[in-house]
Image (cartoon, grey):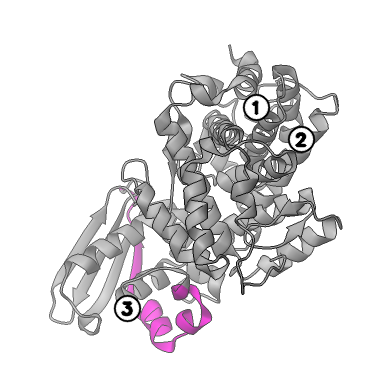
Amino acid sequence: MSEKTTETLARFAASLTLDAIPARTQQACKALLLDALACALAGHQGEETAELGALASALAQSKESSIIGGGHLSLAGATLLNGYLITAVTMCDTHRATLSHITPEVVPPTLAIAERDDVSGGELLTALAVGCEITTRIGLGLDYPVFRKRGWHGPGVVGPFGAAAAVGRLRSFDTDTMARAFGLAGSQSAGTFAAWGTPTVKFHQCRGALSGLMAALLAEQDFVATKEFLTAPDGGLYNTYSNGGKPEDATADLGKRWELERIALRLWPSASLVQGLITAMFDVVEKSDVATKDVAKVRIVLPKTPFEMHGIFATYKAKFEALLSAHYIAAVILHDRALNLAQFEPARYDDPVLRRFAAERVEVVADPSLAEAQAIAELVTTGGRTLSAKCEHPRGAPENPVSYEDIENKFRTYAPSRLSPAQVEATLDAVAHLEDLKSARTLIDGLRPGKGRKAQVA
């Protein structure tokens, strides 16, 4: 029954054991963790990372919790900053059914409590599974099209629940305490698409991580909160943020079908809704023998929503808009045959040739008949030929998955800026064998800046 939705999810989160998580699902959790670490290490290059670091430092003066690839801050400060680091350069995971990033909210408080309490790797892995599954499950119950039409942005709304669930699992909450943690998490759910086009959309994620941490720690103190937040008639999540939602979807086949396995990963920086464009562009440039100088025009066809969100930056201002710009992304893939953080540094996106090409020779149009994940890339040559590729599912989507080796390579690409070569390999080994670690600190301690790297907060 829908009125028992919160209790059902709370019981699942409180009672899940490592043995009950299938090997395939455990592997998916390891990929999510490794991807989050890669993103966080890259996130030190984010434009606004120093600003978030200053905020995180101002929260408290203690130094008990580790920054991924950095120094130490308070429990709250580390949770906030690590959440921002994971999402800072726009290449973290996405649960496409709810257009929500998951690991920026779940991983930071889980690592912080795992480090504080010196839990085992198996306990850490179980908590990550709990957090990711609860976040995606609660999102499914929202009836996303209605939720989105009202302007809500998923990470800040559903993220606090997953963060609270993961912390609660590490702290051995019973069902009653977990349900109250959900009530406290829901009381902090917020974030709308009014922030779109600004870095504030990334603040939704790290703030969701901190909200979930606070919810769990307050519930642990026996603070009174509603134990049926999701479906409460007056002010419950599903009735207030949606039209009553679909609470049955949140609990359907719980523990048998793992929604966290539907979380998409990104090989490339840039927004989740342009991953189809990127996939199509790489397909067409890698399969053609046309030199860049012989391309007269690039034509990109996007579904309605991605077009409205990403087809508006033909003349982008700086890094953040370049990361969102379909025009720039198409142009730089054509010119560089690559797309990583180097393509989003000022030396590249401010190149006059690229700026002119993106503004004048990349055409982005909408086709409402395309499904949201689809995209078409066409190269029109100076000789009149048209070469095209259509993406049905972006790389990293559940229907077109990346391999664990791909995520390892992503980690190897971005980790050396903060970690020594030995640390890179040790971290890969620790994540791969997470369930065997006697202490999660083995992993966390290895994420401090390597020799010769700065151990700054951000």
Dot 1 falls on a residue whose secondary structure is: helix
Tag in front: 2 or 3: 2
Quarter of the image where one finds residue 142? top right
Residue that carries the numbered disc 3 in the rendered image: 335
Q: How many marks?
A: 3
Evaluate if marks 2 and 3 touch, with contact meaning CB atoms under 8 Å apart. Answer: no
Residue that carries the numbered disc 2 in the rendered image: 215
Dot 2 falls on a residue whose secondary structure is: helix
Work out which quarter of the rendered image holds the N terminus and state it: top right
Evaluate if marks 1 and 3 touch, with contact meaning CB atoms under 8 Å apart. Answer: no
Q: Nearer the viewer, residue 392 or 174?
A: 174
Q: Nearer the viewer, residue 207 or 132?
A: 132
Whether the magenta-drawn stretch holds residue 355 is answered as yes
State the image coordinates of residue 259 (x, y, percent, origin top left): 46, 31
Residue at x 22% of width, y 71% of height? 379
Amino acid type of disc 2? Answer: Ala
> Magenta region: which residues?
342-369
